[in-house]
Amino acid sequence: MKNLVFLLILLLIPVMEYAQDFQELEPPPVIIDTVPKFVKTWIMTEDYTVMEDIRMDTAQTGFQNSYPIYKHSISQSYLGNLGLQTQDNLYFNNGIQPDFFFLNPFSPYMHTPENNVFFNITRPFTLLEYFASTGDRQKREEMFRALHSQNITPFFNMGFDVRLMGSEGTYLWQKSKFNSVSLFGSYTGNDYSIYSSFHINTQTAQENGGLLNDSVFLNTSKDERAYEINLEEAESKMRSMNYHFSQRYKFGKVEQIPDTTSETGFRRLRERTTKTGSLIHNFEYQRSFRQYFDKITDQNRDFYPNYYIDPANTEDSTYYRSLSNTFQIMLDENPNRAKDFGARAFIKHDWVKYAFNTVNDTAINARTVNYARRTFYPEPGGLREVSNDTLRNTKDTIITSHRDYIYNNVHIGASFLHTVGEGWDWMARGRWYLFGYKAGDLILDGYITKMIQGGKGASIISISGKFAIEEQDHFLNYYESNNYRWNNDFRKTKDIRGSMILSNETIKARVKFDLSLVSDLVYFNDSAMPVQHQPVVSVISGELRKDFKAGIFHSNHQINYQVSSDNNVIRIPDLSYYTSNFLGFVVVKNALTAEIGFDLYYYTKYRALAFSPSSGLFYNQDVQEIGNYPYLNLFLNAKLKRTRFYIKWDNPYAGMIKKNYFHVLAYPTRGKVVRFGLSWSFYD
């Protein structure tokens, strides 16, 4: 608790300090009833240089889709239990992944600096949410969220976001918890701004290794907890801590004029006789780890492929640390010049440390490798570090050792942006790694966008492209644990991508086409080991979204079709489909509205993924095909002013048709279950 208080103070001191310094220079706020509650809510993009506006999720439609993974995609492979690992089935949805490789399967659950929402509001805002399943307490799933934000001054905001989720486990030994705590603050001054956030994500789980026999599950009907499982004592734990601090100074002449529509009663304009812009500094620190434990017995010994450290007990530990500083200069566009453009240049330094427990074999210590390594002896009260020479001179083969790699990555980059005038908006950017583990990496991307006015409203067409040469993640090249061990020298992956999007908000339609040509792709084969595929693999995807409305009837559809040129490497379903159909009507005028209908998720059968508990990663399998099962949810939504409520019945025909409701080999999802959710928002 003391550490948490200290970190909270550390997070907010810089913001509070500058808020006090600047608030006396600003004109007093004009408080009137017509001022909107939310002046602005945004996330930071483009290396924390762009404030991208977002809307708070307080809508009634879609509220029943409370599962975090389905807020990100219509098609997922997951272990059937809230808080456990998941992977998106839509190839082009897998964008930027966490720096710590073993966090990838938790991306939909995690709260990070990249997705942190900042506020500038006129009244304190609080959001409370609770979701749960009904019925058997031994299988209950629950989620709770508490979000609060308020402005201390018109430009200084503070807040927190706490998310707790957990499940007792639908099947034996499957209990899981995922908790996220976020603290954030911002000072959005006219010349000087600060954005800061602190996040802790923690996950613990009982790892059952899946069902012992899928055919028994498919051909019998009994309670989920009556089926045998592969592992009965295995456990895993993951924790990630992120701290981000960004400061920005704007330069260029400024004049202040009265403006009664502004929240402060004044508006500040930058004089365009001189170029305006910003100097920006970002600081980030991350500390993450994953642990896995299991006692090896005659019952589970054959489940694991190898035993490199201890044949009787597994105690794996893998962790990652990084400290980054980015310095940027940004030049603004001139809104009065149609041919003007903005520009940004930056340099970034990363100090990165990778570590894992290593094989207890003194022979490996004589290897000559290009990394920093430290080794430890266990002693009462802790671990004692020993030098490489000391280690080479000992004959003790029961050493508990730990290996780490330390790098200093440096890369530079620039971007150019044009958004002024009636023509095409465009952006081009690139980054090049000069030193470190990623030396030689090159990433170039950009887009062009045009708004076209038509008889049915404005349509937007956007074309984007990307060319990337990137080093493999460090843990794909070097990794050791009790059950897996590899030492690779993979080539850099080359990826060329193109995308086109056409959308029209008036008719509620969106079409998207994607293409990827990738060579030297690394994937996990059917032995759960990383391998590299040198020939080019192509993936083509087309997606259509369309919403229909006729009176009180609503019918929303999203369909995705994707094809891989090599299904042995990239495992994805060809067709994924989601539809939501409901009647939306007013129960009490200006007070209570309701929606009643159903959601349906479906994807075609394909050779899906398997899961390795000890590594915490998905891999390809050829045992059986998975898919071709319609996941139906019946729901009732209601909204009473600022309170939302839903109740739904998931998978209502489970057991009446074939029970092949698997997303991952040996991991079925839950059968029929009733869920409910509540959400309250307050503006005072």
Image (cartoon, rainbow, N blue to C red):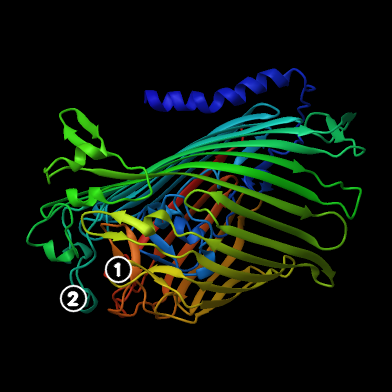
What residue appears at the point 82 percent right and 68 percent down from the top-left corner? 452
Q: Residue furthest left?
A: 298
Which residue position holds label 2? Answer: 216
- Please provide percent x and percent y for residue 519: 50, 72
Is the residue 256 above or below the residue 499 in the image? above
**Does 492 sit left or right of 628 as displayed?**
right
Q: What's under tag 2, amino acid-wise?
A: Val
**Which image quadrant is residue 443 in?**
bottom right
- Please provide percent x and percent y for residue 372: 36, 42
User: How many other residues sit within 10 Å of disc 1, few (<14), some (14-19) or many (≥20)?
Assistant: many
Nearest the eye: 145 or 281: 281
What mark, if any, has residue 668 been given in the picture?
1
What residue appears at the point 20 percent right and 37 percent down from the top-left corner? 390
Would residue 554 be seen by someone viewing this image from the given angle? Answer: no
Nearest the eye: 294 or 577: 294
Is the residue 424 above or below the residue 21 in the image? below
**Does 578 sit left or right of 140 as displayed?**
right
Which label's residue is closer to the chain start, 2 or 1?
Answer: 2
How far is the residue under mark 2 from the one under mark 1?
12 Å
**Which image quadrant is residue 118 in?**
top right
**Which image quadrant is residue 289 in?**
top left
Nearest the eye: 71 or 241: 241
